[in-house]
Image: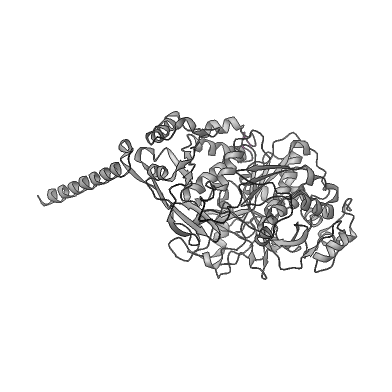
């Protein structure tokens, strides 16, 4: 009798509570009678440096980007694994755009259910836009009051320094839509994807209107200047890193010699292309790029006039000198660096640049908020996935702290990179510039001490590139004068992919418990490889400077990949595509192991470099002749010389 009484009371209480929730939902939001039973879809606390202010102005409008559940992503994932694994019958038989879209296209039932929901709130469904694969629905601009009803939430104004955006920390959906909608933006994402480069503490000098190679090299180099002794248009075939490199000011002749591309002649430049992305107001200035190439890769100087620029989502193709405000913020430096080193190493491969959106203007309280609603990665991915022709490699030098990015956003972006990989694109990221973390960020969202993973380098469908410095031996890059340390670590969001198991398990066992509890030992580990990222020469606003950062390492490595693709295409073979399964199953033999240094940070020694793969330098730096040779093979014997049983 007593048991029955308790159960009866519990059931009665639940029914009363359910009735209250249903009643509240149906009465507080007119037009929701059909969708009374909402529940929370996502809650993500805003990063601490974003200050929440007042409720969003009623006159503010948002265009919602609704990501639908992709019908057969698991099948796409399976095909990507097959395409990327040496020895498999489908190895490098990349999918067409149409085949990828067919795999990720939602069912008609999903699309109809979402349209019905929107129509119930009087959203004009005839104005909805769809991505080519129909996995994105983009609404027309909607009043903030209607958006809040759709998502059962409240939007607020958030401020960070002079940037102001409208966001919320949680949103809900009708229960029957939870499995049909994966993501809605803008909602909980505050990602800024800042550039990774750091200006070195070296002398900065104005280049002359018609720069002299001797003068420029002598001005930027603190050590022995060797560049004026080399005919850069026709360098000797027996050049060595010792004679080509000045590690106080690293230029293309050093990089091409160090990685073995110097004597390679491109054979399929008209069929191949490499690309970079610009975010947050960055741009690629042709005059600066031409000056750089004139100085350090003179036979490629005309490429500064020829590369293709795509402006997406309100980006501006700025070809005038930087303004005082832009100079103060360092704007344009990252865009120039990326384009200059890619052309400096990868020319004559054609370069394509994608500039996405612009930096939001300072908030003006007497006008409507800036029209800057969508996250930059989503803007670029929606654009690039709609294209039929794609570059064979894309470099990205922008990142954010992983835990500040909502899981739904990170997953969707990462899955979109998988689509690019399936279509034959190698996606490359820098591994970060704060070691295992800036001490101010070294905690979990709950506040516990924790190393800091970075996104998107933590995505398992891209290739992450750490930074090195010096030659013979190469070591993990750092610069004590500006706080730069090459990044590496383990994702908190993404599980470790199977292709990493041998290498990462071996490394963790050799750590012998070092830093246990400060990282997710089962997460996707990065970086995968490394390239020079210390005191890289760049020209910005007519000024020659040197910078540090994995934002240099990523485009340098991408340029080497572009030349490997050139060789493959010339042989009538497909490009590399998603690189990692090939890399971890034997391709690592084309890389020079880096065994010195560590990713210190978070007031610790960080992850040490070791023989074989490590979380500081990956497999090390590329050696093009072996890279090219192994890439042309369909299979190779899997050997793990560092593996410990």
Rendered location of residue 67, percent (x, y): 48, 40
Relative to 519, is 414 above or below?
above
* Left or right, 136 with reference to 297: left
- Residue shown at 65% from the left, 37% from the top: 92
What colour scheme governs how the chains and residues are painted in the rendered image of this protein?
A: one colour
Residue 608 is a magenta residue: no
The answer to whether residue 291 shows anywhere in this view is: yes
Frontmost residue, 534 versus 503: 534
Rendered location of residue 405, percent (x, y): 50, 53
* Left or right, 16 with reference to 554: left
Magenta segment's dominant SS is loop
Rendered location of residue 541, percent (x, y): 75, 57
- Residue shown at 74% from the left, 51% from the top: 320
Q: Residue furthest front?
A: 366
Q: What is the tally of numbered marks visible in this picture?
A: 0
* Left or right, 199 with reference to 29: right
Frontmost residue, 464 versus 114: 114
Rendered location of residue 1, percent (x, y): 9, 49
Q: Quadrant of the C terminus?
A: bottom right
- Residue shown at 58% from the left, 69% from the top: 605
Start and end of the magenta stretch?
86-92
The answer to whether residue 417 shows anywhere in this view is: no
Relative to 532, is 564 above or below?
above
Residue 88 is a magenta residue: yes
Frontmost residue, 230 versus 546: 546
């Amino acid at each position: 009798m007593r048991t029955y009484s308790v159960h009866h009371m519990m059931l009665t209480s639940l029914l009363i509570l359910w009735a209250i929730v249903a009643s509240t939902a149906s009465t507080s939001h007119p037009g929701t009678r059909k969708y009374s039973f909402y529940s929370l879809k996502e809650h993500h606390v805003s990063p601490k440096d974003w200050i929440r202010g007042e409720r969003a102005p009623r006159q503010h409008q948002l265009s919602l980007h609704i990501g639908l559940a992709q019908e057969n992503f698991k099948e796409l994932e399976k095909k990507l694994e097959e395409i990327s694994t040496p020895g498999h019958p489908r190895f490098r038989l990349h999918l067409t755009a149409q085949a990828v879209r067919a795999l990720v296209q939602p069912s008609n039932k999903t699309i109809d259910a979402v349209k019905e929901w929107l129509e119930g709130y009087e959203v004009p469904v005839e104005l909805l836009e769809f991505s080519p694969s129909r996995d994105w629905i983009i609404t027309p601009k909607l009043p903030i009051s209607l958006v809040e009803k759709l998502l059962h939430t409240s939007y607020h104004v958030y401020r960070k320094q002079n940037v102001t955006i409208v966001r919320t920390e949680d949103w809900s959906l009708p229960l029957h839509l939870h499995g049909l909608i994966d993501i809605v933006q803008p909602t909980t994402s505050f990602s800024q994807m800042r550039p990774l480069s750091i200006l070195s503490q070296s002398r900065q000098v104005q280049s002359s209107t018609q720069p002299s190679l001797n003068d420029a090299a002598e001005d930027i180099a603190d050590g022995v200047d060797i560049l004026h002794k080399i005919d850069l248009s026709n360098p000797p075939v027996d050049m060595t890193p010792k004679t080509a490199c000045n590690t106080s000011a690293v230029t293309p002749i050093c990089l091409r010699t160090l990685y073995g591309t110097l004597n390679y002649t491109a054979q399929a430049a008209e069929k191949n292309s490499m690309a970079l992305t610009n975010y947050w107001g960055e741009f690629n200035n042709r005059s600066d790029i031409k000056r750089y190439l004139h100085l350090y890769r003179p036979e490629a100087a005309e490429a500064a006039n020829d590369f293709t620029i795509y402006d997406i989502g309100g980006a501006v193709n700025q070809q005038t000198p930087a303004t005082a405000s832009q100079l103060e913020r360092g704007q344009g430096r990252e865009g120039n660096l990326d384009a200059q080193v890619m052309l400096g190493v990868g020319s004559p491969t054609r370069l394509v640049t994608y500039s996405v959106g612009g930096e939001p203007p300072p908030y003006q309280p007497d006008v409507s908020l800036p029209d800057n609603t969508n996250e930059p990665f989503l803007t670029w991915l929606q654009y690039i996935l709609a294209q039929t022709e794609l570059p064979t490699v894309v470099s990205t030098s922008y990142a954010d702290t992983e835990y500040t990015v909502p899981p739904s956003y990170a997953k969707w972006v990462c899955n979109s990179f998988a689509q690019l990989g399936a279509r034959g694109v190698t996606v490359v990221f820098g591994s970060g510039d704060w070691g295992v973390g800036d001490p101010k960020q070294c905690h979990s969202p709950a506040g516990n001490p924790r190393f800091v993973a970075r996104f998107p380098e933590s995505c398992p469908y891209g290739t992450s590139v750490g930074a090195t410095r010096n030659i013979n031996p190469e070591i993990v890059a750092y610069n004590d004068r500006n706080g730069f340390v090459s990044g590496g670590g383990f994702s908190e969001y993404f599980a470790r992919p199977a292709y990493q198991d041998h290498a990462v398990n071996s490394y963790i066992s050799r750590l012998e418990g070092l830093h246990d509890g400060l990282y997710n030992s089962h997460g996707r580990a990065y970086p995968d490889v490394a390239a020079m990222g210390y005191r890289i020469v760049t020209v910005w606003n007519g000024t020659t400077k040197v910078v540090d950062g994995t934002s240099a390492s990523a485009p340098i490595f991408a340029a080497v990949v572009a030349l490997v693709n050139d060789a493959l295409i010339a042989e009538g073979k497909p490009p590399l595509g998603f690189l990692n399964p090939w890399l971890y199953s034997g391709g690592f033999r084309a890389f020079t192991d880096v065994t010195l240094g560590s990713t210190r940070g978070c007031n610790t020694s960080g992850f040490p470099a070791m023989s074989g793969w490590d979380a500081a330098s990956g497999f090390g730096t590329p050696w093009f002749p072996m890279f090219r040779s192994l890439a042309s093979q369909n299979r190779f014997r899997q050997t793990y010389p560092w593996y410990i049983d």
